[in-house]
Amino acid sequence: METNGNGADVAARVERRWAAISVLLIAFLAGMAAFAGIHQATMPQRTVETVDPTTIHLQGEFIEANLGSAVESDGSVTVRAVGQQYSFSPPCLVVPAGTPITLRATSADVVHGLLVQGTNINTMLVPGYVSVLQASFSSPGEHLMPCQEFCSVGHEGMWGKVKVVDKQEFLAEIADKRRLSCAL
């Protein structure tokens, strides 16, 4: 087999081409990330509300008497919940079908995740911050609500549920109570 001295030149050209391809790929991915961030596809909430996680059960919006579903003056429903090791409070949320829902939630201790299966509701509950989500459920039914962020050894048992009921049934029940949970 005959060799000429051009092998090193060929290898250098191939390496330069692959280096150029790698640099172009990295630049393309960085450009995509910047484009998505600029156009708010990956941006955090516009406003960030804070709460003191050491006193949320004692004062303010997330005391136990305020947790669950409540009808606002405009007819929308606000649901307040707290994630804590190893449960959600309340463990079951009742919401009406076909009504705008505002979910306001926080964590009392560590980072938790709130995911309502079968919907696009998915957020992290970070101690000291209030997560706010807008949603609407089209039909009655039940949805599991597991914690999808590993929060410690009891994480696998941390789940709740969302019970979607007919709007008239919801309004009849809430007329007698200030807040609702799954005691329907």
Image: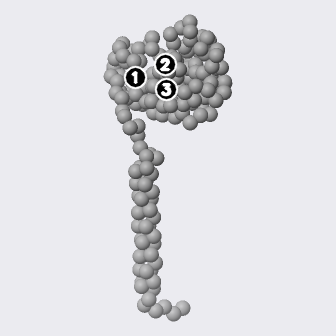
In this view, the residue in front, 4 or 99, is 99
In the rendered image, which quarter is residue 59 located in?
A: top left
- The image position of residue 153, as x and y in percent, is 48, 27
Report crowding for label 3: few under 14, some 14 to 19, many 20 or more residues within 10 A (C-alpha): some
Residue drawn at x 58%, y 19% is 94
For residue 144, above or below residue 35: above
In this view, the residue in front, 67 or 168, is 168
Q: Mark 2 or mark 1, which is nearer the start of the sequence? A: 2
Q: Amino acid at mark 1?
A: Ala
Residue drawn at x 54%, y 33% is 121
Q: Mark 2 or mark 3, which is nearer the start of the sequence? A: 2
Report crowding for label 2: few under 14, some 14 to 19, many 20 or more residues within 10 A (C-alpha): few
The kind of secondary structure element at disc 2 is loop
Q: Which residue is mark 3?
A: 103
In this view, the residue in front, 2 or 63, is 63
Number of residue marks:
3
Q: Are marks 3 and 1 in contact (CB under 8 Å)?
A: no
For residue 25, above or below residue 114: below
Q: Which residue is mark 2?
A: 72
Q: Is residue 145 visible?
A: no
Q: Amino acid at mark 3?
A: Leu
- The image position of residue 89, as x and y in percent, is 49, 18
Q: Amino acid at mark 2?
A: Glu
Q: Mark 1 or mark 3, which is nearer the start of the sequence? A: 3
For residue 35, above or below residue 128: below
Q: Which residue is mark 1?
A: 108
